[in-house]
Amino acid sequence: MYTRLKSVVFLAALIPLALGIWDGFHDALGANPVEEITFRSGRWTLRFLLITLAITPLRKCTGWNGIIRLRRMLGLYAFFYACLHLTTYLWLDQYFSLTDILEDISKRRYIFAGFGTFLLLLPLALTSTHGMQKRLGGRRWKQLHQLIYIAAGTALLHFLWLTKADYRDPLIYLCILTALYILRLPALEPLITRRR
Amino acid sequence: MLIKKNVSIKSSEITPESIYLDRRRFIQGGVGAALAATLPGSLATAASRYSTTEEQTSLKDITRYNNFYELGTGKGDPALNAGRLHTSPWSIAVSGACEHPGNYDLDELIKPEAIEDRVYRLRCVEAWSMVIPWQGVPLGKILKRFAPTSKARYVAFRTLLRPAEMPGQRRDILPWPYREGLRMDEAMHPLTLLATGLYGKELPNQNGAPIRLVVPWKYGFKSIKSIVSIEFTETEPATTWNLKGPDEYGFYANVNPAVDHPRWSQKKERRIGDIFKRPTLPFNGYAEEVASLYAGMDLQKYY
């Protein structure tokens, strides 16, 4: 059953990419396609981070323990869209100009937060395999993967800091992230956990 | 794309498109001068030595990628919401240090002037740019008719405030109404244009219909849209983005690759239609015409 569910989720998570490619070939990315690709890949990174963080609370609320099997894939999709986002910036926006990129990182806090997020996600992606999980040992692996809490926060800071005037969208994401943090408070555990 | 039809024009007054498209041949043919005088003001246009010959951005892109927060903050929102805005009738309130203040109907302001073609580069503060064929009247020609007094050192503009037709104004994104201003010498400069048309047609609502400012050597946010008020002032007027973020958006806002926006570099820009960026030029390539206006000024300080 879970193999089929995983296949469905695997394909569903590729829909944003497929839509982007489709739109790219049909002049539907607007007048500034590079900006649109940057926005879309960035938003999908954040969305997949939030979806990944929602798995544990969802498992507790519903009592559906199997859902945890989707978590690694969802986290890897966050990393996948982050790679697309970063590549768009490095290549299409900065054309691999190292001096411009370094200046951007050192001068602009939202770029710094963006790079920081990627560097936090990188070790999580690299240690996501069963093999690495065993080599690190369960406890250390778990500790390392708590970096996602920081990464989601820095991703959101990146979004807030690049916003010019209309804060509605980043604030919606902030509310969701805050809720996902709060749901993890030990005091709430007995309230949200569904007894079987 | 939405272009509003102006209902006040009789169909008999409208130049057939074939004749309109052929206007240069008419004018070159010798009979032009007399004939051009009989054409409706909004269509008889003259070329300008200030126009660039660079490849023009497509009408589609100019009208679907807009920063006009009154009609929504997404780049595509202004085109989607454009139909809600009604721009006829339209009048402009002229006030402050001048001898002829009052409410002027738009036609009354524009009709006496010759409409000129101006193909200008537009550089947005967000590091993208376009090349846009405007039609309009040099602002200075119109301002002179109000006879500004010696106290008029600046000119302040305001955009229409009408939340019922401009959904963006129902949210507290910027201090409404949108305000902009120029120093008097900037306003009188022959490059500074009051635009009423785009690509030979009436200005679409998302581009600031029915009348907007175009100051090609400054970042786009200086070129205020849908103007309803012009005021001559003695002191520097407050301007919207400067109120919102004084360290990010200055009063002068001259295009300057040497002064970065705090959150992004201004060294390069993406010309809409291109993938990769190109270098940004001082004063957006109009340094020869306007650099002298700022002689002796510290442009790092007065950004």
Image (tube, coloured by chain):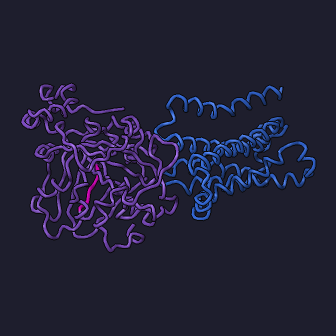
Chain colours: A blue, B purple
Residue B136 covered by magenta stretch: no
Q: Is residue B211 visible?
A: yes
Question: In terms of image quadrants, where is residue B8?
Answer: top left
Question: In terms of image quadrants, where is residue A15?
Answer: top right
Q: How many marks?
A: 0
Give how far across and how far down residue A168 sits, in percent. Answer: 52, 49
Between residue A53 and residue A136, name the one nearer to us.
Answer: A136
Between residue B201 and residue B130, name the one nearer to us.
Answer: B130
Quadrant for the C terminus of chain B in the image: bottom left
The residue sitting at the left extreme is B34
Magenta segment's dominant SS is: strand
Who's the residue at 14% across and 42% down the image? B107
Q: Is residue B177 visible?
A: no
Who's the residue at 26% across and 46% down the image? B118
Who's the residue at 19% across and 40% down the image? B45
Give how far across and how far down residue A52 sits, in percent. Answer: 73, 43
The residue sitting at the front extreme is B29
Quadrant for the N terminus of chain B in the image: top left
Residue B9 against residue B118 in the figure, above or below: above
Give how far across and how far down residue B155 sits, in percent. Answer: 23, 62
Residue B233 against residue B15 in the figure, above or below: below
Q: What is the span of residues highlighted in magenta in the rendered image? A: B155-159
Who's the residue at 64% across and 54% down the image? A114
Q: Is residue B32 left or right of residue A45?
A: left
Give how far across and how far down residue B210 sits, in percent. Answer: 25, 42
